[in-house]
Amino acid sequence: MITDKLKKGHLLIAEPSIIGDLSFNRSVILLADYNQEGSIGFIINKPLKYTIHDLIPEIDASFKIYNGGPVEQDNLYFIHNIPDLIPNSIEISNGIYWGGDFEFTKELINKGFINNDNIRFFLGYTGWHENQLETEMKSNSWIITANSYENKIIGKSATHFWKEQIMELGGDYLIWSNAPENPYLN
C-alpha cells in the first residue's frame, strides 16, 4: 500500500531509478524515527559478510550484520521485537523496537534467549536532515509503504526483499522486478 505520509515504522523502497548508489540502489529502509529535525532509518535488506561474533567475539552467535546506511558505519545498532526482555528499548512502531541495554542483550544472546527472528544488527544508519527526505520524495527517489510485516520484518529474508516489494507494487514497477541491478550492463 503506497502512501505519501512519512511516518515512523513505514518502509522506504528505493525507486528503480536509483542506479549506481552503492548504499541505496535496491534498498528497503525501515524508518525508525521521523520528526521536524530529520529522519533516521536502517537498510534492512543489505547483509554484510560479518556476523555479530566477528565484531564482538564475546557474543557466541552467528547473527548476520546488515549495512544500516552510510552514516556512522563504525557503530553497531539493533532493532528487535522483544522489549519485555531488553530494557530501555524505544518503540518504532508495530512491535518493533530500537536499541536497549546492550550488555544485557549480549547475555541474553549467549544464553540462547534471542534468535534471528527477534533481532537484527546494523553497522551504520541512514539519516536525513530537516526536509532532506521530503526533497528526495519530491524527486521520486523513494516509494513509501506501510510495513505490512509489522514486527515479523526482523526475521524476514533480505535476499529478494526489494524485488518482492517492487512486485507487490505492481503496475509499471513489474518490469523492474527482473531487471539486472545495473541495467547499463544488460
Image (cartoon, rainbow, N blue to C red):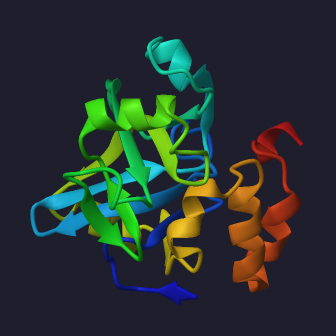
Q: On the image, which quarter does residue 122 sit in? A: top left
Side of 10 where 91 appears, left or right: left
Give the residue at the far front of this rendering.
111
In the rendered image, the vertical position of residue 116 relative to residue 47, given as above or below: below
Most extreme residue toward the left is 37
Q: Quadrant of residue 106?
A: top left
Which of the two residues, 34 or 180, is positioned nearer the viewer here? 34
In the drawing, does residue 159 fall left or right of residue 140?
Answer: right
* Left or right of 115 on screen, residue 166: right
Residue 99 point in image, percent of width and height: 29, 47
Examine the rendering and report whether any part of residue 170 can be seen. yes
**Residue at x 43%, y 73% (from the top left corner):** 10
| Residue 108 in the figure: left or right of residue 155 | left
Q: Picture coordinates of residue 76 (x, y %)?
A: 35, 30
Q: Which of these two is toward me, 69 or 56? A: 56
Residue 69's x, y, as percent? 42, 39
Quarter of the figure that contains the C terminus? top right
Q: Residue at x 48, y 11 (%)?
A: 57
* Whether residue 70 can be seen here: no
Q: Residue at x 31, y 77 (%)?
A: 7
Q: Residue at x 73, y 79 (%)?
A: 168
Image: 100 above or below 61: below
Vertical placement of residue 52 versus 112, above or below: above
Of residue 109 and residue 97, the one placed in the foreground of this image is 109
Classify residue 179 by image quadrant: bottom right
Q: Quadrant of the N terminus?
A: bottom right
